[in-house]
Image (cartoon, rainbow, N blue to C red):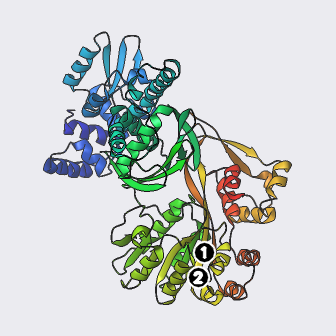
Amino acid sequence: MNIEPLRLKKFLLDAELITEEDFDRALDISTKNDQEIGQVLVSEKLIDQERLTKFEAYLLGIPFVNIEKESIEPGVLNLIPKQVAKSHNIIAFRKRDNNLEVAMLDPEDLITIEFIKKTNPLLKILPRLTTPDGIKNALHQYEASLDIEFGNMIKLDAKDLQDEKGKKAEPLTRGIRNIKEDAGTPEKKEELIKIAEELPIINIVDTLLKHAILQRASDVHIEPLEKEVVARFRIDGILYDVMTLPVATSLGIVARIKVLSNLKLDEHRLPQDGRFKIETDEYKYSIRVSVLPVFNGEKIVMRLLAENVKTQTLDGLGFAGLALEKVRNNLVKPTGMILITGPTGSGKTTTLYAMMEILNTPSVNISTVEDPIEYRMPRINQTQVNPAIGLTFANGLRALVRQDPNIIMVGEIRDNETAGLAINASLTGHLVLSTLHTTEAAGAISRLIDMKVEPFLISSTLNVVIAQRLVRKFDGDKERYKLKPADLENLAKYCDLDRILKILKEEKLLKPKATLKDIELYRPRPSKDSESGYRGRVGIVEVLVVNDAIKELIVKKTSTKEIKMRAIQDGMRTMVEDGFVKAAQGITSIEEVLRVIVD
């Protein structure tokens, strides 16, 4: 796209959007690096991309379109093949009568426009200017449109299998064979390999994984039933049915995933675990695979772990105010133990990584023993547990203490031996970070005692215990409402409403003389982008600091309830209370808080 720099400079100076000095500096950089002046202006943060593109569109006399806000019909999108769209940065987004509007980064690319005209001779091509991010996001819609096409193909195949037995099925199930579950002969293994390498099966598995990544799924479930195979995605902690496949595809899908994960193809009686990677120009994922024999075949669960994402901060995970301050104060202590508790999928490991990101400086040696290593971190020595060769958490921890570490992270304390070793490590001059499966912070103490750790050792080493859950966040518009007497009566079963009222006033979410009936809460409002009205998750937390009073209660083997009550007296906010604050702030709903808290 050819816009004279001096012409652009005059326009931006007249609009008072940039100084002459800044523009000249950007021009020097663009000349030295052989870059377009617009790219430099954006990279140097002198102007944002959308505003610059709008000005360029004005100077060229071409309409601007924010393609990210356009709802593109699959039929219109596919008028330009994906490979052409990707290589030439052009998206067909609207068709009116014989006019086809296309969003481009370079509307002066006449060769591409002529090519589109030749492939669509009855249409008039109308170029529109858009941003690079707009094109990038619009390209994802090709994957979204696959859902419709793929779903229709699967439905046709299912119909063929049901209504036309004896005939060959259409593309996705063509050539898929049923193999008897008899002895694991070499012929059977070779047959399985052939099935796994068939194009229809490869397409099915690839499409499922593409959709899972596109929809931000954390897990993919493939479950064989008597007459069909159900694919489900876990998105923001909730499982959704996304696709039903013909039962004839089951064996091929399992074989394909076993091949990718380097698992035994002819082993159908025992559970197997494996791993493989997906890499494209846009993303890089590590896929953990679990295969489990069930009545109708083998069930597969794949955990999707993004490898090219930045470690989250404690603030971004939901820690705020006094809770965040308490955690930070305990992270600077050179010895002791920090425990994070909660059920599977509550974000414990993510919080551990956020803590290590804070602690990761050249002056310390951080070593970990994990199962599995979910994210690679620079300058941190990460060890993967491998029970098959005897590398357990306990054995790994024994080895780590001989590596001169300052900080040790143990992925999970699962047994008495690991608990004892972790306590001893924290007694001998190390800061130990780990996780436990308990429902609340105070429960970690009784859990350690159950693991045969002496109470006096717990009181000497335990610095802080964090309990957490993940709640879904609102996406877009939300509906306001106020609590009714029946709502308050129901909430009183799960929390102290007087404390809630006091906390909301401390947070200045209510006026001094207000009551809970005055507070505005929110409900999700579904949209075209989010059927549930939620997108993403945030933590609700409780942080129990082991002070002198708590230490005394631990030594006396006091009950979990009494320890919790003492911690509340000392200023601990429970997860429900933290969740109520986030609900009042419009981050989530109170129903979502209760969903993850109530057993």
Amino acid residing under circle 1: Val
Q: Is residue 264 left or right of residue 330?
A: left
Of the 4 image quadrants, the one containing the C terminus is bottom right
Which three-letter amino acid code belongs to the residue tagged 2?
A: Leu
Residue 195: image location, x then y, percent? 36, 37
Q: Which element type, helix, strand or loop, lies under badge 2?
A: strand
Say left or right for 93 vs 453: left
Coordinates of residue 210 in the picture (x, y in percent): 41, 40
Secondary structure under badge 1? Answer: strand
**Res 107 seen here:** yes
Residue 408 as seen in the image, left or right of residue 5:
right
Q: Which residue is mark 1?
A: 465
Question: Residue at point 38% right, 25% down?
Answer: 171
Q: Which mark is residue 462?
A: 2
Image point (53%, 40%), residue name = 224
Q: Where does the N terminus fall, quadrant-wise?
A: top left
Instruction: Please say whether residue 15 is visible from this viewpoint.
Output: no
